[in-house]
Image (cartoon, rainbow, N blue to C red):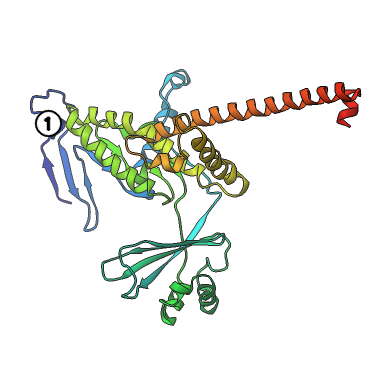
């Protein structure tokens, strides 16, 4: 292989002031052509944004585990918490198939079209300005249509009954292709921590740092925010070592809270009612009764400018504590009132309390 020496005696942040003196010494970088399809590169800054494949994050976890195992037991007690990828079991797995759609000329081509039932969700998003759309049919695990090589006639009957406006846009050849197509799976919830960097010049961001299902645009928007924050810290700090550590301070906890909030909105059955639907009902009632005290529901809070995920989490915890206090006080007051009423009735009728209750 051919290797070219790339002189790099300083690890200073190339975007920071030239007056900076903070450096990290290391051997010269070397670029090696291993073969026609791969190469090895040592760089001043490695930004890992490889999505759910999470190659760099997995290697960081392996490196931390190996280093921890090499420590003596006493030192291991006092070392910092190791880096790890937290993986949640997907207890509400969703499966989808993509559907090409060509909208008629008299339909608007600048809208997102969607429909939702207990069985399925479908969203159609514009692929261009000529009426070509990409439809995503989201189904639950175990649905007869959520398989490869399903019956095209059954799929046609499903569209004719449930989505006739979309079914009319799919010809028989396309319907056959959709029926044969293997399903795809929404990603499971993952986050990494307690840091988002390794050493002095490696940082991870986007889906490889925090993976959520594509609801409410949280995943894409938070990835863009990661990029913005990384750009800020590279400008504000004197070198890459300081930059990656500052990025961890600003974004690591945000990544964790983002995933935990998103997962709470995706639980199945009664658990989903308890963690998502019931809180929405409570927030709606209390915000309407006392908007100066209780904030809107969590979906509305996530759309507010100037609030990060930790702000939303802390505010909803305060709201929930206040709501539980009000409800507990109300139930206690109702109990006291009921007992008082029973005593009054007992005196008026000359009967005992137990007789009145019976």
As drawn, 60 above or below 142: above
Q: Residue furthest left?
A: 18
The residue lying toward the viewer, choosing from 16 and 265, is: 265
Q: In this view, does 57 lie to the left or right of 357?
A: left
How dense is the environment of label 1, judged by Cα within 10 Å: few (below 14), some, or many (20 and up)?
A: few
Relative to residue 145, is residue 36 drawn left or right? left
**Secondary structure found at label 1:** loop
Front residue of 30/331: it is 331
- Where residue 309 appears, as percent x and y from the top left, is 39, 36
Q: How many marks?
A: 1
* Residue drawn at point x = 49 percent, y = 70 percent: 163
Which residue shows up at 32% across the image and 31% down it? 250
The foreground one among 104 and 273 is 104
The front one of 258 and 352 is 352
**Residue 279: horizontal and vertical position, in percent?**
54, 39
Tell me residue 215's x, y (percent): 43, 50
Residue sitting at the far front: 348
Q: Is residue 106 above or below residue 343?
A: below
Q: Mark 1 points at which residue?
A: 9
Q: Is residue 64 visible in this depiction of the protein? A: no
Reply above or below: 114 against 275.
below
Q: Residue 21 occupies which quadrant of the picture? A: top left
Percent from the top left, x then y, of residue 177? 43, 76
Tell me, yes or no, if residue 136 can be seen here. yes
In the rendered image, the quadrant that contains the C terminus is: top right
Residue located 8% across and 28% down the image: 18
């Amino acid at each position: 292989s051919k290797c070219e020496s790339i002189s790099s005696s300083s690890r200073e942040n190339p975007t920071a002031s030239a007056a900076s003196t903070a450096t990290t010494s290391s051997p010269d970088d070397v670029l090696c052509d291993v073969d026609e399809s791969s190469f090895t590169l040592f760089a001043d800054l490695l930004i890992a944004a490889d999505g759910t494949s999470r190659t760099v994050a997995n290697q960081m976890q392996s490196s931390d585990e190996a280093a921890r195992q090499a420590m003596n037991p006493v030192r291991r007690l006092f070392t910092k918490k190791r880096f790890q990828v937290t993986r949640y079991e997907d207890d509400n797995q969703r499966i989808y198939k993509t559907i090409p759609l060509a909208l008629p000329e008299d339909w608007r081509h600048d809208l997102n079209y969607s429909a939702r039932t207990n069985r399925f969700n479908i969203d159609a998003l514009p692929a261009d300005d000529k009426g070509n759309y990409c439809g995503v049919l989201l189904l639950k695990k175990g649905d007869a249509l959520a398989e490869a090589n399903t019956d095209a006639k059954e799929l046609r009957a499903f569209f004719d009954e449930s989505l006739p406006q979309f079914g009319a846009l799919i010809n028989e050849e396309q319907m056959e292709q959709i029926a044969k197509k293997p399903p795809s799976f929404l990603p499971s919830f993952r986050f990494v921590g307690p840091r988002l960097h390794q050493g002095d010049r490696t940082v991870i961001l986007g889906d490889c740092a925090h993976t959520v299902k594509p609801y409410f645009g949280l995943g894409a928007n938070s990835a863009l925010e990661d990029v913005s924050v990384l750009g800020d810290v590279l400008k504000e700090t004197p070198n890459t070592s300081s930059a990656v550590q500052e990025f961890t301070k600003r974004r690591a906890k945000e990544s964790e809270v983002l995933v935990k909030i998103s997962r709470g909105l995706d639980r199945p059955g009664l658990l989903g009612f308890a963690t998502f639907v019931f809180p929405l009902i409570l927030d709606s009632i209390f915000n309407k009764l006392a908007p100066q005290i209780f904030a809107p529901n969590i979906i509305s809070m996530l759309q507010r400018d100037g609030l990060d995920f930790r702000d939303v989490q802390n505010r909803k915890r305060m709201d929930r504590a206040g709501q539980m206090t009000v409800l507990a006080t109300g139930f206690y007051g109702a109990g006291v009132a009921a007992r008082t009423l029973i005593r009054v009735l007992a005196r008026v009728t000359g009967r005992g309390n137990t007789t009145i209750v019976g």
